[in-house]
Image: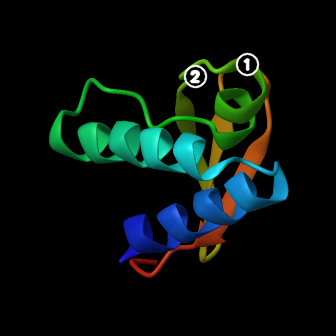
Amino acid sequence: MALEKMLEVLRERLDVEKARDSQKAVWQAFWNEAQKESGKPIPCPFCFVHTNQVNRIIPLPNEGKVARGRCEVCRNEYRWPDADA
């Protein structure tokens, strides 16, 4: 499923940004909330680690079998395999 791949990519980015374990746990809680309620943002890992803010990753059109999203604030783009494509 595409969401599992997206989660994997975003967790890897938390590691790249050197998130502390406590930050990862809080970020994961925000991810879980976003999966339960459609109005909740999927949090940008870069913004979360560096500004402690929950900024929304907005969907972009797929590029073939690659799904994409971009943070509405920092403009970082994230890519993951789209298993549904």
Quarter of the figure that contains the N terminus? bottom left
Asked whether, in this view, residue 59 is left or right of residue 16, the answer is: left
Residues marked 2 and 1 touching at CB (< 8 Å): yes
Front-lying residue, 69 or 26: 26
Asked whether, in this view, residue 80 is left or right of residue 15, the answer is: left
Measure how far apart labels 2 and 1 are at the Cα level.
10 Å
Front-lying residue, 46 or 21: 21
Q: Secondary structure at mark 2?
A: loop
Pinpoint residue 80: horizontal percent, then vertical percent: 62, 69
Question: Quarter-wise, where is residue 73 in the image?
Answer: top right
Pinpoint residue 5: horizontal percent, then vertical percent: 50, 73
Question: Quarter-wise, where is residue 37 in the image?
Answer: top left
Above or below — where is 81 with respect to 27? below
Instruction: Give the residue type at disc 2.
Output: Asn
Residue linked to disc 2: 55
Instruction: Give the residue type at disc 1.
Output: Thr
Residue linked to disc 1: 51
